[in-house]
Image (cartoon, helix red, strand yellow):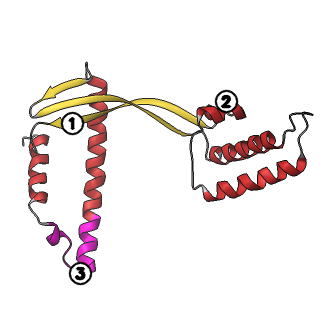
């Protein structure tokens, strides 16, 4: 038995799925919709996995950052990413930021002493502000330099590549 061409199978599946109006996808009982939803989620996971595998193969095998293929062009681009070093890193960053800001605010430049009352007010202010800020994962350069914090202490950085498609037609 001959295996079908994967690009042909993908095009046929796309044509089949696109041929069903969205209203038809959303019409039916909860059981019908749940079954469709479940199957489309499984299809989404499979397609995502296949796309990731092809993307990595292209990244590894492209000699240039632009390559032509029938119907379009591939573009390989460099992407920077980062992730917390540990699951506690975000908390450590917030704690260190709070301490650095409080110490900076509480510093009496004339004596070099830290005013404990100013420090407590600054810590309380930071604690309230950080409750209101849902999340952050970086610090502005000026703040890092002034407060002596290094984002690399909290996050790991990596460079990877991603391939995108510039299609010449709408297949």
Please tell me whether mark 3 sits on a helix, a strand or a loop. Answer: loop
Residue at horizontal 25%, vertical 23%? 62
- Residue 34 magenta: yes
Residue 98, x across and y down, in percent: 73, 46
Q: Quadrant of the C terminus?
A: top left
Residue at horizontal 13%, vertical 52%? 14
Q: Earlier in the sequence, mark 1 or mark 2?
A: 2
Rate crowding at label 2 as few (under 14), some (14 to 19) or many (20 or more) other CA atoms within 10 Å: few
Rendered image: mark on residue 43 = none
Rate crowding at label 1 as few (under 14), some (14 to 19) or many (20 or more) other CA atoms within 10 Å: some
Residue 54, x across and y down, in percent: 26, 36
Q: Give the image quarter of residue 25.
A: bottom left
Residue at horizontal 61%, vertical 47%? 87
Rendered image: mark on residue 29 = 3
What distance separates the C-alpha of mark 3 from that of mark 1?
Answer: 38 Å
Please tell me whether mark 1 sits on a helix, a strand or a loop. Answer: strand
- Residue 83 magenta: no
Q: Which residues are magenta?
A: 22-38
What distance separates the C-alpha of mark 2 from that of mark 3?
Answer: 59 Å
Please name the predominant secondary structure of the magenta segment in the image.
helix
Please tell me whether mark 2 sits on a helix, a strand or a loop. Answer: helix
Q: Earlier in the sequence, mark 3 or mark 1?
A: 3
Tag 2 residue? 145
Residue situated in front as seen by the camera: 89 or 114: 114
- Examine the rendering and report whether any part of residue 5 can be seen: yes
Residue situated in front as seen by the camera: 50 or 126: 126
Rendered image: mark on residue 165 = 1
């Amino acid at each position: 038995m001959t295996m079908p061409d994967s690009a042909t199978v993908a095009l046929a599946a796309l044509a089949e799925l696109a041929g069903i109006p969205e209203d038809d996808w959303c019409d039916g009982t909860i059981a019908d919709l749940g079954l469709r939803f479940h199957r489309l989620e499984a299809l989404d996971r499979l397609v995502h996995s296949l796309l990731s595998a092809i993307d990595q193969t292209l990244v590894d095998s492209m000699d240039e950052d632009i390559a032509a293929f029938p119907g379009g062009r591939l573009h390989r681009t460099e992407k920077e990413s980062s992730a917390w070093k540990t699951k506690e890193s975000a908390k450590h960053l917030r704690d260190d930021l709070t301490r650095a800001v409080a110490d900076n605010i509480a510093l009496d430049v004339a004596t070099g002493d830290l005013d404990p009352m100013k420090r407590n007010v600054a810590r309380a202010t930071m604690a309230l502000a950080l409750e209101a800020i849902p999340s952050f994962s970086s610090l502005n350069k000026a703040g890092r330099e002034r407060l002596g914090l290094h984002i690399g202490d909290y996050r790991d950085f990596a460079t990877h590549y991603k391939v995108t498609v510039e299609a010449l037609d709408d297949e």
